Image (spheres, rainbow, N blue to C red):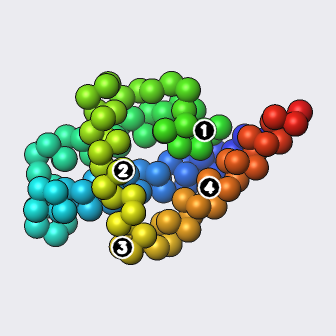
């Protein structure tokens, strides 16, 4: 099932916000930055992630970057993002519970679609 342009734009915006919030949470917890600010390292990672999300050609069909067949991050950035996700994943539930509900819904929809494709 392909998304419409409007749905794709909403998904892109939501994914962009989730990644940004996870990087902010990571930077504040690990690098002890002030609320609402990022260290230069995390700022560069966030800028790179936002650029990748904005240019992703698979946004209509993919679920999450981790499940994508094409990894557009360089190995170093891929490991940095993985560290951010490992740290922020469990903690973001308490900071942004609605965001987590959207993520859970997206995950369930992706699993349903993959089962349907497997049956077909």
Instruction: Return the x and y of residue 48 as percentages of the image width and height.
Output: 29, 37
The residue indicated by pointer 1 is 62
C-alpha gap between disc 3 and disc 4:
19 Å
- The answer to which of 68 and 38 lies nearer the viewer is 68
Between discs 3 and 2, the one toward the N terminus: 2
In the image, residue 5 sits, relative to residue 95, either above or below, namely above
Quarter of the view holding residue 3: top right
Task: Please identify, in this view, whether the residue under mark 1 or under mark 3 is nearer the observer.
Answer: 3
Instruction: Return the x and y of residue 61 as percentages of the image width and height.
Output: 65, 37
SS class of the residue under badge 4? helix
* Quadrant of the rendering where the N terminus is positioned: top right
The residue indicated by pointer 4 is 106
SS class of the residue under badge 1? loop
In the image, residue 39 sits, relative to residue 45, either above or below, namely below
Task: Please identify, in this view, whether the residue under mark 3 or under mark 2 is nearer the observer.
Answer: 2
C-alpha gap between disc 1 and disc 3:
26 Å
- The answer to which of 30 and 46 lies nearer the viewer is 30
The residue indicated by pointer 3 is 95
Judge left or right: residue 43 versus residue 53: left
The residue indicated by pointer 2 is 85
In the image, residue 68 sits, relative to residue 100, either above or below, namely above
Between discs 3 and 4, the one toward the N terminus: 3
Task: Please identify, in this view, whether the residue under mark 2 or under mark 4 is nearer the observer.
Answer: 2
Q: Are marks 1 and 3 in contact (CB under 8 Å)?
A: no
Characterize the local packing of mark 3: few (<14), some (14-19) or many (20 or more) Cα atoms within 10 angstroms: few
C-alpha gap between disc 2 and disc 1:
18 Å
Between discs 2 and 4, the one toward the N terminus: 2
C-alpha gap between disc 3 and disc 2:
14 Å
Q: Are marks 2 and 4 in contact (CB under 8 Å)?
A: no
Judge left or right: residue 92 versus residue 77: right
C-alpha gap between disc 2 and disc 4:
17 Å
Instruction: Return the x and y of residue 55 as percentages of the image width and height.
Output: 44, 33
């Amino acid at each position: 099932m392909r998304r419409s342009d409007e749905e794709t734009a909403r998904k892109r915006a939501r994914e962009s916000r989730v990644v940004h919030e996870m990087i902010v949470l990571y930077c504040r917890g690990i690098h002890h930055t002030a609320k609402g600010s990022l260290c230069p390292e995390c700022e560069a990672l966030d800028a790179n992630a936002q650029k990748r999300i904005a240019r992703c050609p698979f946004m209509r069909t993919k679920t999450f970057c981790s499940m994508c067949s094409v990894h557009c991050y360089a190995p170093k950035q891929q490991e940095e993002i993985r560290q951010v996700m490992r740290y922020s994943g469990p903690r973001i539930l308490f900071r942004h519970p609605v965001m987590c509900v959207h993520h859970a819904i997206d995950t369930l929809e992706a699993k349903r679609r993959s089962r349907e494709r497997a049956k077909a």
